[in-house]
Amino acid sequence: MEHKKTYNAKELKTPFGSLIIEGPITGEALASYEFHQDLVAFRTPNQQHKALIEIADLPEGRIIIARDQHTIVGYVTYLYPDPLERWSEGKIENLIELGAIEVIPKYRGCGVGKNLLIVSMMDDAMDDYLIITTEYYWHWDLKGTGLNVWEYRKVMEKMMNAGGLVWFATDDPEISSHPANCLMARIGKRIDNETIEKFDRLRFMNRFMY
């Protein structure tokens, strides 16, 4: 599959000044920006910055960022699912995963996450993909936001809806381990029925066990 990437950008006005939301950006461009020290949800900031640069240079990898001048304050990643996860087992070449989305605490509630998704979907090539995301409550900043798991889940769903991702049922054990966890997906306009059927089989791999 040819992975076409078309750069898009928009300005987002916030109470703390304007941010540029842009991408997909190259590893070289990512390396030229500072990475905010409050981006700590997945790894240390330096390690995560390095990981994003590597993802940006993968054929299917996409990184959309929010930046305050020269400093990255938020990002979203798209790449093939982890080989250890069930979502890679179907070997669906046009299935990619929204792997991580993070915004520094200062800009939360300013619509940054929502706009990262909106800019992501400005690229027409996104209609060639079946995009999934797996939401696990243990990744959520419940302490920092003061929200309970259900309030946070509602915020996450609303944000993902801005990018056209909607809830899908699954029997995946990790997702099923807590009712707040969920699978969400966006089926691009040019996705064929065969791909959708493969995805459905991946969603319910344990159905014959009952």
Image (spheres, rainbow, N blue to C red):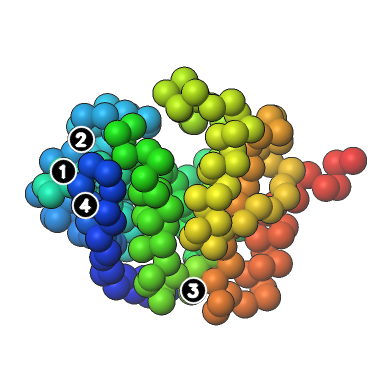
**Element assignment for label 3:** helix
Q: Alpha-carbon neighbours of circle 4 within 10 Å: few (<14), some, or many (≥20)?
A: few
- Cα–Cα span, label 4 and label 1: 12 Å
Q: Which comes before the other along the chain, label 3 or label 1?
A: 1
Residue at the spot 27% in from the left edge and 54% down from the top edge: 13
- Cα–Cα span, label 2 and label 1: 6 Å
Is residue 74 visible to us here?
yes
Residue 55: x %, y % from top left:
30, 51
Q: Amino acid at mark 3?
A: Asp
Residue 83: x %, y % from top left:
49, 46
Residue at the spot 40% in from the left edge and 41% down from the top edge: 109
Residue at the spot 57% in from the left edge and 31% down from the top edge: 137
Q: Alpha-carbon neighbours of circle 3 within 10 Å: few (<14), some, or many (≥20)?
A: some
- Cα–Cα span, label 4 and label 3: 29 Å
Q: Which comes before the other along the chain, label 2 or label 4?
A: 4
Identify the residue position indicated by label 2 in the image.
36
Residue 18 marker = 4
Q: Which comes before the other along the chain, label 4 or label 3?
A: 4
Residue 155 marker = none
Q: Are marks 3 and 1 in contact (CB under 8 Å)?
A: no
- Cα–Cα span, label 2 and label 3: 31 Å
Q: Nearer the viewer, mark 4 or mark 1?
A: 4
Identify the residue position indicated by label 1 in the image.
71
Q: Alpha-carbon neighbours of circle 2 within 10 Å: few (<14), some, or many (≥20)?
A: some
Q: Are marks 4 and 1 in contact (CB under 8 Å)?
A: no
Task: Identify whether 167 is placed above or below 123.
Answer: above
Residue at the spot 37% in from the left edge and 31% down from the top edge: 42
Q: Are marks 2 and 1 in contact (CB under 8 Å)?
A: yes
**Element assignment for label 2:** loop
- Cα–Cα span, label 3 and label 1: 30 Å
Residue 127 marker = 3
